[in-house]
Image: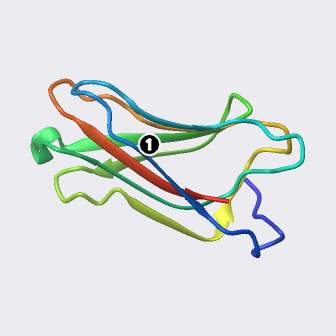
């Protein structure tokens, strides 16, 4: 995992709210001149009785960050002061909130 050297780039907000029992996925296409950096993510389910959620970040097809979070208390908020980056230029970034049967997930991320 690396941190981005330049903090000057503006973040873009991404969101995905899929159908029930479907993974929420945010994909940012590869760019030959850009390494993607995540500033913050927020993940939750509409049914707080689900217990735990799993959030996975991949760059170039490699998992660079994975966490389980307490869905009961909606503690699926992650902020990276210097940004989360583990990829390289020309690698796609994929953030996935795993599906939970019977629940609808919501995934938001600020990416630069």
Q: Position of residue 83 (x, y in %)?
A: 66, 65
Q: Is residue 99 above or below residue 26?
A: above
Q: Position of residue 41 (x, y in %)?
A: 46, 57
- Check the image and name the residue furthest to the right: 33
Residue displayed at 12% across by 42% down: 47
* Tag 1 secondary structure: strand
Viewport quadrant of the C terminus: bottom right
> Toward the viewer: 1 or 100?
100
Relative to 87, 45 lies left or right: left
Q: Quadrant of residue 49?
A: top left
Is the residue marked by circle 1 packed among few (<14), some (14-19), or many (20+) residues within 10 Å?
many
Q: Position of residue 42 (x, y in %)?
A: 39, 57
Relative to 13, 81 lies left or right: right
Q: Quadrant of residue 87?
A: top right
The residue at which mark 1 appears reads as: 55
> Toward the viewer: 4 or 26?
26
Residue displayed at 32% across by 39% down: 17
Q: Position of residue 100 (x, y in %)?
A: 25, 29
Residue displayed at 32% across by 32% down: 18
Q: Is residue 98 above or below residue 52?
A: above
Residue displayed at 88% across by 40% down: 32
Relative to 104, 48 lies left or right: left
Colour setting: rainbow
> Toward the viewer: 71 or 33?
33
């Amino acid at each position: 995992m690396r941190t981005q050297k330049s903090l000057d780039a503006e973040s873009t907000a991404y969101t995905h709210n899929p159908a029930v029992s479907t993974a929420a996925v945010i994909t940012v296409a590869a760019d030959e001149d850009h390494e993607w950096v995540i500033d913050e993510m927020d993940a939750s389910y509409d049914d707080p009785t689900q217990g735990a959620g799993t959030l996975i970040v991949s760059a170039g097809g490699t998992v660079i960050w994975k966490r389980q979070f307490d869905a009961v208390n909606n503690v699926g908020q992650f902020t990276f002061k210097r940004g989360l980056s583990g990829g390289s230029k020309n690698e796609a970034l994929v953030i996935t909130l795993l599906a939970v049967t019977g629940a609808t997930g919501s995934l938001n991320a600020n990416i630069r």
